[in-house]
Image (cartoon, rainbow, N blue to C red):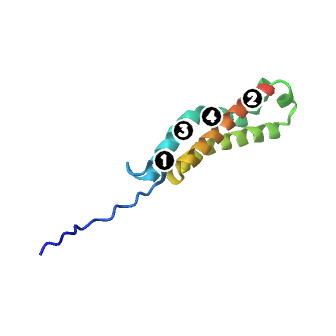
Amino acid sequence: MASGKQQQKPEPELHGGVLSGGGSATLWGWLIGLVVFVFVAVPISIAVRFATHPATQSLFGGRLEDATSGAYSAFWWIVALFLFAIPVLVGWGVAKLSGRTLAIIVGIVAVFFIAILVFGQLF
């Protein structure tokens, strides 16, 4: 009647990347992206302000003061877009990629910030 074998249920596969098991990976990606956005919101705001107010060009002596108004504005719009892309990249990395790839993305973001600081000191 009762056999010696027990029925074993297959273990469910974990889906969702790095933070699976504790909720939806997509929601974790949005949350981490939002946290990163909070940290880069002020630099984004400053870059947009410099892009929309060409009179701020006189604040930067030397090479940026000699640039045309359109080039100055375009430079700051590009910086603002790159800064806005950082939270999107980090959120996507949390939602879709492995831990190793996430560490690579964090390294790329850190190198980006260090490069901005170094190049900012050169001008």
- For this view, does 24 lie left or right of residue 72? left
Q: Is residue 93 above or below residue 111?
A: below
Mark linked to residue 45: 4
Mark 3 or 4, closer to the camera: 3
Dividing the image into 4 quarters, which one contains the N terminus? bottom left
Q: Callout 4, which amino acid?
A: Ser
Q: Is residue 87 above or below residue 63?
A: below
- For the residues marked 1 and 3, what is the alpha-carbon distance in whole angstroms? 10 Å
Label 1 secondary element: helix
- Residue 106 shows up from this direction: yes
Residue, far bottom: 1
Q: Earlier in the sequence, mark 2 or mark 1?
A: 1
| Labelled pair 2, 4 in contact (Cβ < 8 Å) | no
- For the residues marked 3 and 4, what is the alpha-carbon distance in whole angstroms? 14 Å
Q: Residue 105 at what x, y percent from top left?
A: 61, 44
Q: Residue 15 at what x, y percent from top left?
A: 43, 58
Mark linked to residue 30: 1
- For the residues marked 2 and 1, what is the alpha-carbon distance in whole angstroms? 30 Å
Label 2 secondary element: helix
Res 85 quadrant in image: top right
Mark linked to residue 93: none
